[in-house]
Image (cartoon, helix red, strand yellow):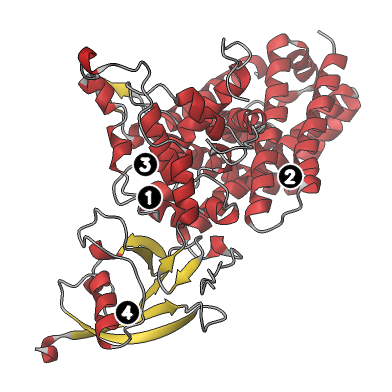
Amino acid sequence: MTENLKIIEIEVLRYNPESDREPHLEVYKVPFSDDMSVLQGAQYIKDNFDGSLTFRWSCRMAICGSCGMMINGIPKLSCETFLRDYYPNRIRLEAMHHFPIEKDLVVDLSGFIEKLESIQPYIIPKEPRSLEQGEYLQSPKQFSDYIQFTSCINCTLCYAACPQFGLNPDFIGPGAIALLHRYNMDSRDGAAAERMELVASEEGVFHCSAVGYCSEVCPKHVDPANAVNINKTNAARDYFLRFLSPKGGSK
Amino acid sequence: MKPGLKRSNAPIFWSLFGAGGMLSALFGPALVFITGIAVPFGFILPADAMSYPKMLAFAQNFIGKGFILAVIALFLWFAAHRIFHSLHEVGIHAGVGAKLICYGSAFVATVISVVVLLGLGF
Amino acid sequence: MSKRRPYVRPMEGWWKKNPYFVEYMIHESTALFVAGYAFVLLVGLVRLGQGEAAWNGWLEALSSPFSLIIHLLFLVAILYHTYTWFKIMPITMPPIIVGGKKVGPGVITGSGLLAALGASLVMFALVFWLGG
């Protein structure tokens, strides 16, 4: 069977925190068929050449959001990227940019998880209803206001695409702000003012300089850049009009 | 919510940036063409369109004053904001110094424009 | 003891590594030309305030070949600023819904460019009308 297979060179940025001072590249010659994804290429390396190669994956169908990596310098989900599209050239795999490398292709996402928590990614009801009062009703129009921003799979490719996050790791960043916007835009939610404190803060939306690459690489077309920039306008309005608001806006 | 969040003053600079960016995108190319190419070289447009009496009258008119101030000041606030951010992006973290030079020159230019425009009378 | 030792990669030269970022830096740097042109106008305004002789001196400087080259550079750079400003607009502004559908990015960019064209024509007409 192997004689029918083409061979592609896969270069992987390796880093072992226990033995390496810094990451280095290693090249593997991988036989592949046309239906093999980049993720399968990495799995081939792990199974046949070096069992210590470390990377995250789960669903293999672009919905779990765990197999993101830099593929020839571009943030992509490795499960929906195919080796055949790179052959006969060499393909280079690196851990997602702008995150600390934990080991090989695995990055430290704890900062992202903290940011995700900080935006309160759940509905905080405008008016709490008892069970007897029934469900929260929502019109198709109200649903359409936020549906796009629910598609996020937390793959963090947008962070790997965002130089401002790379330069200022405190920046809440595209993905978390897109999700924040998703809850703010939900007619059942009433916590936009509460979340404004974060949006308008020094870690908030104003780190963004509208590079727009986050929206370009998003595998689910969430358009996080749009969410961030809409919230710049919201934060500016809150900044200038906070003295007119009865609650005084956030601090 | 995270404790110790500080409200950013960015909206002030960001609004000036946005206004200047929009104004220069809408009027910039035509203005450069009119004041720097067409009129000085008598190309397409009348060569005396920027003669002293005409420009003085323009700068003494309320709308003219507003337009001149908006163009000079907002163009510079826009540029100051972008240049300051670009410095940071290419790794020059000059901090307060860069901030003072970028926004400071926009501020000084705004003050000079206001003083001159007021001095020209109405 | 933890064996963790997360490695943070440097950001130096990030903008040279991806054509998308190179373009970003180019359109950001048009700001230098916007500033340069605003500075020329500021000098003009100051000269206007100093009287007729000073103003005429500024006009004369404008008709030098050097000034022409500078202004041609300004023109190209600021035209590119106009194009990129409206190109980015679809991601920077809230969605516009017309007839229940979101207005597409091409329409937003196109409207912006048309508005710039309209503003330019109005200015040309005014210069003809007031300056002729």
Q: Residue furthest bottom?
A: A3
Tell me how far mark 1 sits from mark 4, CA to CA. 24 Å
| Mark 1 vs 4, N-terminal side | 4
Report which residue position mark 3 lands on. Answer: A223
Tell me how far mark 2 sits from mark 1, CA to CA. 40 Å
Report which residue position mark 4 lands on. Answer: A89
- Say which residue appears at 79% left-offset and 17% top-offset: B56
Dividing the picture into quadrants, the one containing residue A80 is bottom left
Tell me how far mark 2 sits from mark 3, CA to CA. 43 Å
Labels 1 & 4 near each other (Cβ < 8 A): no
Residue closer to the observer: A244 or C89: A244
- x and y percent of residue A11 in the render? 38, 80
Tell me how far mark 4 sits from mark 2, CA to CA. 49 Å
Circle 4 sits in a helix, a strand or a loop, which is it?
loop
Tell me how far mark 3 sits from mark 1, CA to CA. 8 Å
Other-residue count near label 2 (Cα within 10 Å), few / some / many at <14 / 14–19 / ≥20: some
Tell me how far mark 3 sits from mark 4, CA to CA. 31 Å
Report which residue position mark 2 lands on. Answer: C67
What subunit carries mark 4?
Answer: A
Instruction: Tell me the amino acid under the disc marked 3.
Output: Asp
Other-residue count near label 3 (Cα within 10 Å), few / some / many at <14 / 14–19 / ≥20: many
What subunit carries mark 2?
Answer: C
The verdict on a common chain for dots 3 and 4 is yes
Residue closer to the observer: A75 or C119: A75
Mark 2 or 1: in front is 1
